[in-house]
Image: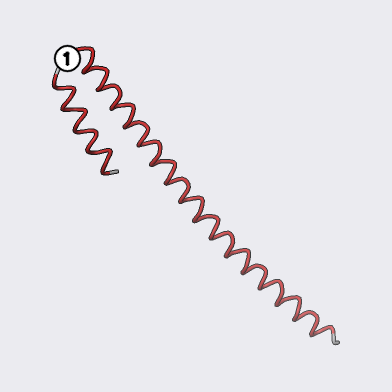
């Protein structure tokens, strides 16, 4: 086999390998961005639940209906998420 054909084969293998690595990098990047979005959503839901707990405790401590209204409003917003 001529050296010319060996070099062409090596160049083709390198190009295909780089293309495959680019595809893997793109997939990993998209997956990582999706994971970040999920983590943000979980954080938002956790903070909303903590706000609900605070409104519940305020209502139980003060027996004021304004806290019930706040609780109901935040609960509806949380269910939409």
Question: Mark 1 = which residue?
Answer: 63
Spot occupied by residue 8 in the image (x, y as percentages of width and height): 75, 81
Q: Is residue 44 left or right of residue 63?
A: right
Question: Is 76 rendered above or below residue 4?
Answer: above
Of 26 and 34, nearer the camera is 34
Residue 78 percent coordinates (x, y): 28, 38
Query: Who's the residue at 79% across and 85% down the image?
Result: 5
Residue 48: x, y in percent?
Answer: 31, 32
Q: In the depicted view, which residue is nearer to us: 79 or 47? A: 79
**Where 31 falls versus 44 (above or below)?**
below
The residue lying at 21 percent from left, 18 percent from top is 59
- Residue at the far top in the pictured view: 61
Q: Residue furthest bottom?
A: 1
22 shown above or below 49: below
Which quadrant of the structure image shows residue 63? top left
For the point 29% across and 21% down, the residue is 54
């Amino acid at each position: 086999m001529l050296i010319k054909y060996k070099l062409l084969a090596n160049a083709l293998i390198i190009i295909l390998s780089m293309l495959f690595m680019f595809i893997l990098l793109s997939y990993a990047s998209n997956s990582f961005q999706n994971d970040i979005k999920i983590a943000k959503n979980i954080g938002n839901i956790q903070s909303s639940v903590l706000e609900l707990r605070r409104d519940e405790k305020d209502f139980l401590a003060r027996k004021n209906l304004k806290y019930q209204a706040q609780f109901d409003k935040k609960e509806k917003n949380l269910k939409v998420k």
